[in-house]
Image (cartoon, rainbow, N blue to C red):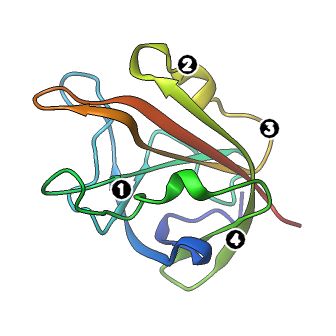
Amino acid sequence: ASGAFVPAQLVIERLRVRAPVEVKGIDAHNIMEAPDRGTEAAWYRFTPRPGAGSNAVFAGHRDFGQVGNPAIFWHLDQLVAGDVVDVVSSQQTEIRYRVTQTWDYGLRDIPMQKVLATDPVEEVTLITCSGAYARGVGYDHRLVVRAVRMV
């Protein structure tokens, strides 16, 4: 789509998030790469670009460095239907999305096919950690937020 772009910034005003976006992929273990820093979001290059008419997938840390040290998605669980998510290009083109649904999945139960689905709907999916934290294991849940483009 002509209006599609590689995202440069993710903005969620309600959470005071203004995060630079890194482009990420899959690592050698077939795991989605996490953002390098707690202040940045990752967009996955194997998902459609924002503006391409489908599902652009982003991830961000809940905390970083040490548990309880807030990162960009520390308050992601506070988003509710109707909240606004903006994705901005390096040329400052902006696409605005409105949250429609949130899910909290156990790590073993997360339906990645559904999370990464290239739906025929212009949307973004945001993923972060949730649940209980165990040293050496990490969090046992994932929070998934979906937002649909506002016309």
Earlier-in-chain disc, 4 versus 3: 4
Q: Residues within 10 Å of mark 4 (few under 14, many from 20)?
A: many
Question: Disc 3 to disc 2, how far (Cα)?
Answer: 18 Å
Looking at the image, can residue 98 be seen? yes
Which secondary structure, mark 4? Answer: strand
Question: Disc 4 to disc 3, how far (Cα)?
Answer: 17 Å
Q: Which mark is residue 111?
A: 2
Residue that extends furthest to the top in the rendered view of this protein: 108
Q: Are marks 2 and 4 in contact (CB under 8 Å)?
A: no
Above-or-below relation of 21 to 146? below
- The three-letter amino acid code for the residue at tag 4 is Ile
Question: Disc 2 to disc 4, how far (Cα)?
Answer: 26 Å
Earlier-in-chain disc, 3 versus 2: 2
Disc number lying in front (2 or 4):
2
Tell whether 62 sits left or right of 100: left
Residue at left 33%, top 41%? 25
**Rendered location of residue 114, percent (x, y):** 63, 24
Q: Residues within 10 Å of mark 1 (few under 14, many from 20)?
A: some
Which residue in the structure is indicated by mark 1?
A: 23
- The three-letter amino acid code for the residue at tag 1 is Val
**Rendered location of residue 2, percent (x, y):** 71, 64
Q: Which mark is residue 120?
A: 3
Above-or-below relation of 107 to 16? above
> Quarter-wise, where is residue 69 in the image?
bottom left
Looking at the image, can residue 116 be seen? no
